[in-house]
Amino acid sequence: AAHDRFVIAARTHERDRRWDAAFAAWMKALHERPSSLAAHLGAVGAACEGLLDLQGAADLARKATQLDPKSAD
């Protein structure tokens, strides 16, 4: 349940273009569900949009690719 609340918050922050808050919410969602592909990709997107922790975003993108190699895009 906490994971879902963080995902909703992250998407709300993205809509409002508050990339730092979106990234933080995605990271909380990842903490709750480390295997969530959506949370990995959300965190990568927010980090890139907000120019936040780009090295961390690259690491998360690699992990997302490992979670689902067919979705490497």
Image: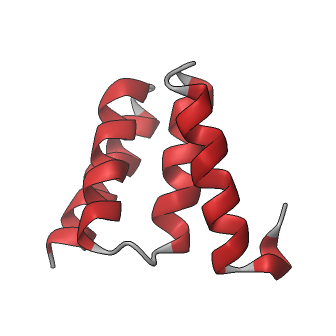
Residue at screen point 53% across, 32% down: 47
Residue at screen point 61% across, 47% down: 59
The image quadrant where one finds the N terminus is bottom left
Count of marks overlaid on the render: 0
The colour scheme of the drawn protein is: secondary structure
Relative to 73, say whether 11 is above or below: above
The image quadrant where one finds the C terminus is bottom right
Q: Is residue 68 left or right of residue 30?
A: right
> Given the current orientation, which residue lies at the most extreme left position?
2
Q: Observer-nearest residue: 66 or 20?
A: 66
Residue 71 x, y percent position in the rendering: 79, 73
> Given the current orientation, which residue lies at the most extreme top position?
51
On the question of residue 42 being in view, the answer is: yes
Residue at screen point 44% across, 38% down: 14
Residue 7 x, y percent position in the rendering: 33, 60
Residue at screen point 43% across, 27% down: 19
